[in-house]
């Protein structure tokens, strides 16, 4: 295991531990910066990563709103003040990373790949809760909004609104548009998200907590 002071915390489904290893190896081909990666699996995706309860948007699984419990477990693992933590994830996990950055000052970087920012009420939440991170990567597939679903079709508008908020907060950030829908090149999108954030924080003179 790396002894680097730069720690990448990758929020994943509990079934995706092998996938996380593949993403880690891909990141290492994309940057020379040394880092340690810690996969953080969750057992109940819709429940553990949603910031508040909400009815199901697709399928039959409602959102349980237990993100606060997940964040408490997560921050208990990220308690070394000598280390710089980057939190990243895909889809609903990407949404969770953005929410966590508003609720905690532990994470200096956020790697939110195709985050589910269409989640009901989330854009309004972010208007009232500034992020504490120094660098934020956002991405979206250019076909993710091409859906007849009235909620999910708003994802382009939602992520553009959030990027505008970050810019106004003078947070180093990027909105990266990828080819394809939500399910294309998931591993590559996650690797790009972490790599950009790693490189930005490495270039900063001060990567410590506020």
Image: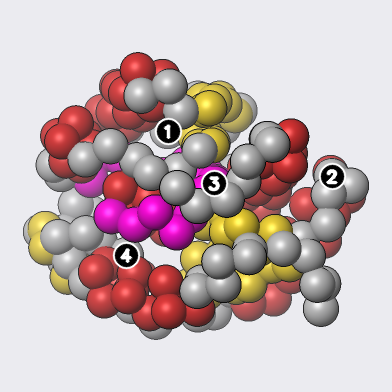
Tell me which numbered mark, 2 or 3, is placed earlier along the sequence.
Answer: 2
Q: Which mark is residue 144?
A: 1
Residue 101: x %, y % from top left? 37, 50
Residue at the spot 73% in from the left edge and 42% down from the top edge:
202
Of 198 and 52, the residue lying toward us: 198
- Mark in front: 3 vs 1: 3
Left or right relative to 88: residue 194: right
- The quadrant the N terminus occupies is bottom right
For label 2, count other residues whose C-alpha is less than 10 Å away and answer few (under 14), some (14-19) or many (20+).
some
- Mark in front: 2 vs 3: 3
How far, Cα to Cα, is label 2 from label 3? 16 Å
How far, Cα to Cα, is label 3 from label 1? 24 Å
Please tell me how many numbered marks the rendered image carries: 4
In the rendered image of this protein, does residue 175 appear above or below residue 28? above
> Toward which corner of the image does residue 30 lie, by quadrant?
top right
Q: Which mark is residue 31?
A: 2
Residue at the spot 62% in from the left edge and 46% down from the top edge:
207
- The verdict on residue 16 being magenta is no
Tell me which numbered mark, 3 or 1, is placed earlier along the sequence.
Answer: 3
SS state under label 4: loop
Residue 97: x %, y % from top left? 41, 53
């Amino acid at each position: 295991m790396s002894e680097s002071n730069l720690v990448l915390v990758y929020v994943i489904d509990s079934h995706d531990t092998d996938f996380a290893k593949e993403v880690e190896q891909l990141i290492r081909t994309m940057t020379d910066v040394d880092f340690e990666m810690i996969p953080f699996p969750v057992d109940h995706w819709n429940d553990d990563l949603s910031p508040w309860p909400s009815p199901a948007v697709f399928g039959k699984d409602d959102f349980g709103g237990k993100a606060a419990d997940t964040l408490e477990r997560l921050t208990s693992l990220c308690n070394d003040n000598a280390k710089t933590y980057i939190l990243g994830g895909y889809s609903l996990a990407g949404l969770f990373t953005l929410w966590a950055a508003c609720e905690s000052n532990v994470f200096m970087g956020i790697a939110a790949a195709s985050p589910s920012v269409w989640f009901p009420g989330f854009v309004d939440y972010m208007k009232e809760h500034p992020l504490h991170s120094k660098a934020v990567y956002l991405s979206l597939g250019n076909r993710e909004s091409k859906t007849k679903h009235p909620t999910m079709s708003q994802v382009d508008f939602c992520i553009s609104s959030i990027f505008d908020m970050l810019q106004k907060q003078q947070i180093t950030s990027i909105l990266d548009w990828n080819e394809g829908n939500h399910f294309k090149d998931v591993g590559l999108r996650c690797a790009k998200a972490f790599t950009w954030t790693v490189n930005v924080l490495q270039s900063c003179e001060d990567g410590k907590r506020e």
